[in-house]
Amino acid sequence: MKELLLIKDTLANKISYYHLMLLLLSLPFDRFYSHIILISFAIHTIIQYKKNAVKPIFTLRTLALQSVFFVTAISTIYTSNRTHAFVEWGLDIPILILPLLLCINPIDLRKYKSNLLLIFALGCTATIVYLYFDAFITIRYYKLSFKAILSPAFTNHNFSKPLNIHATFFSLQLVIGLIHLLSQLINKNTIRISKSIYRLCVIILIAGIIQLSSKSIFLALFLIINLALPFIALQGKARSRYFLIVSTISVLAFIGIVNTPYFKNRYLTEFRKDLSATNTEESLEPRMERWIIATELIQQSPLIGYGAGTEIGLLEQKYFDKKYYYSFISHLNAHNQYLSFLIKSGIWGLLIYLLTLFYGFKKAMQKSDIVFFSFMLIVSIVSFSENLLDVDKGVMFYSIFFSFFAFSSYQNAIENYPEKTINIS
């Protein structure tokens, strides 16, 4: 633990390290903290500017990391709603400046990547413990059965409500911490006492992810743990042993979900409803209906879209015409990042986003970086069910971790996993 807080480096790099540490730890909480820390980090980086320490700025890496901001900026040229377009500019500012700051700042992120991810994972674990503590205090106060922890009153958004954060966006963060800890558990060089702590944290993070009940995150995590992690980080007998352990756990988890009324309804029944036509008995319109409406808009202007800041206004008009009053009153977006790009910037904007995702996947595979790969996978999957880049928590998560992984990827797979083996004992 001492090595996580007391690093050996120049004073400037130590201050940069603590800024990044606090920035990661602030992600689950009110956006005020992450914004203040980011501004402080920017000021510190500018003050410590040294020309001979600047990394190349005009590179494909920088362009890929900033691409979403440029799509918003270009599509502002022909928008009919400049006011909301410039609101989106402000929202996307971290996507523009973080890669520039990491180019200018002399800190070697490769050196501290594992430290920062571990601190983030421990912070996420502590946050989940706090949420469970808050939930059980409430249960005790109202003299409810402890089984109420598995009821809708204490799951999904209600579980994350004390932090005022969307359940899916908090789950995104938990997955990053969880996969980093798992990667350390399968690393033979991790000492035994650390593994004991990591196992406990893994259990708590998995419990938190289940409690938050995000369907898209559950799907992404299933793919990461059952397929991505063993194929990227393991080989030979280690991979076979891992498959045996994880497949058994996955089957038991599925049985547990099916036999728990709330989770069965959340993961199976609601998922089916989201992908079905409107049920007149339901008060909420399923996502599929909003996707159909979004597709109708896209067909009228497929090449360039309607411009930045126009999505919600256009959808609201369609919601009202089709009597989708809940979606209209709630000002709901398409809940699909890919459709959002098509509405606002057309095919060219979506193509740039897809190329950006491809760039991230390619770099993660080249470095055999399972945490980087997991980040790209959850962003890609959640983009099907949420407008990830239209809310502050999504933008901060995307900009911070995408830039962090792009600048801190290890030189080769051997540095990341000295021995591709599994040792969970």
Image (tube, grey):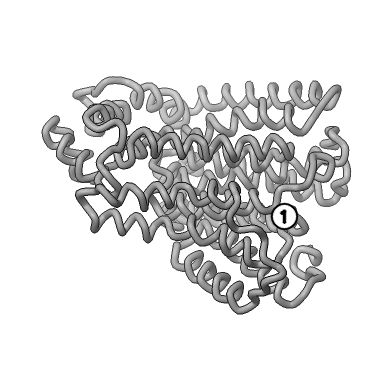
Image quadrant for the C terminus? top right
Image quadrant for the N terminus? bottom right
**Where residue 19 appears, x then y in whole percent?**
62, 69
Which residue is at the front of the view, 75 or 387?
75
The kind of residue on which mark 1 rests is: Lys
Task: Mark yes or no: residue 227 visible.
Answer: yes
Residue at numbered disc 1: 113
Element type at marker 1? helix
Left or right of residue 295: residue 20: right
Q: Give the quarter of the image for residue 247.
A: top right
Left or right of residue 174: residue 166: left
- Where 41 falls versus 201 (above or below)? below
**Where residue 314 appears, x then y in whole percent?**
20, 41
Question: Residue at left 82%, top 36%?
Answer: 424
**Where residue 112 appears, x then y in whole percent?**
74, 59
Question: Residue at left 24%, top 23%?
Answer: 278
Left or right of residue 412: residue 270: left
Which residue is at the front of the view, 258 or 300?
300
